[in-house]
Image: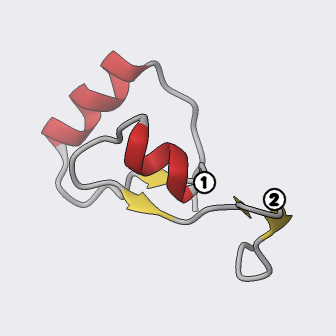
Amino acid sequence: MKVIELTPKQAYDKLQQDNKILFLDVRSSVEYKFVGHAVGSVLLSWMEDPEWKINTRFS
C-alpha cells in the first residue's frame, strides 16, 4: 500500500481521475459528522470520544 500526502485540490483531482482510490478519514466521528468530510470517504477513527481513547481496531 502506498501512502501519500496531498493538498485538498490534489486529492479531489486524483479522486476524479481514478475511482479505485480509497479516501480514508482518520478523524473522530464527531469531526467527520460536524466539520464535514469528502463525499465517498471512509471513516476509520484512530481516537474516539468521549474518552478519546485510541481505537484498538486502528492498525
Upstream in sequence: badge 2 or badge 1: 1
Please give left or right for residue 42 compared with residue 18 in the image.
right
Figure check: 22 above or below 56: above
Q: Which quarter of the rendering shows the N terminus?
A: bottom right
Instruction: Measuring from the top left, give residue 57's x and y in whole percent.
Output: 71, 82
The Cα atoms of the two marked residues, 2 and 1, are separated by 9 Å
Picture colour scheme:
secondary structure
Secondary structure state at the residue bearing disc 1: loop
Query: What residue is drawn where x is 23% and y is 41%?
Result: 15
Secondary structure state at the residue bearing disc 2: loop
Instruction: Measuring from the top left, give residue 16's x and y in whole percent.
Output: 14, 37
- The amino acid type found where label 2 is placed reads Trp
| Residue at image mark 2 | 52
| Residue at image mark 1 | 28
13 vs 29, nearest the viewer: 29
Query: What residue is drawn where x is 35% and y is 30%?
Result: 11
Figure check: 51 above or below 56: above
Q: Which quarter of the rendering shows the C terminus?
A: bottom right
- The amino acid type found where label 1 is placed reads Ser
**Is the C-beta separation of discs 2 and 1 under 8 Å?**
yes
Q: Residues within 10 Å of mark 1 (few under 14, many from 20)?
A: some
Please give left or right for residue 56 compared with residue 7 in the image.
right
Please give left or right for residue 55 compared with residue 45 in the image.
right
Instruction: Measuring from the top left, give residue 31's x and y in whole percent.
Output: 52, 44
Q: Residue furthest bottom?
A: 57
Instruction: Measuring from the top left, give residue 20's x and y in whole percent.
Output: 24, 61
Residue 17 is labelled as: none
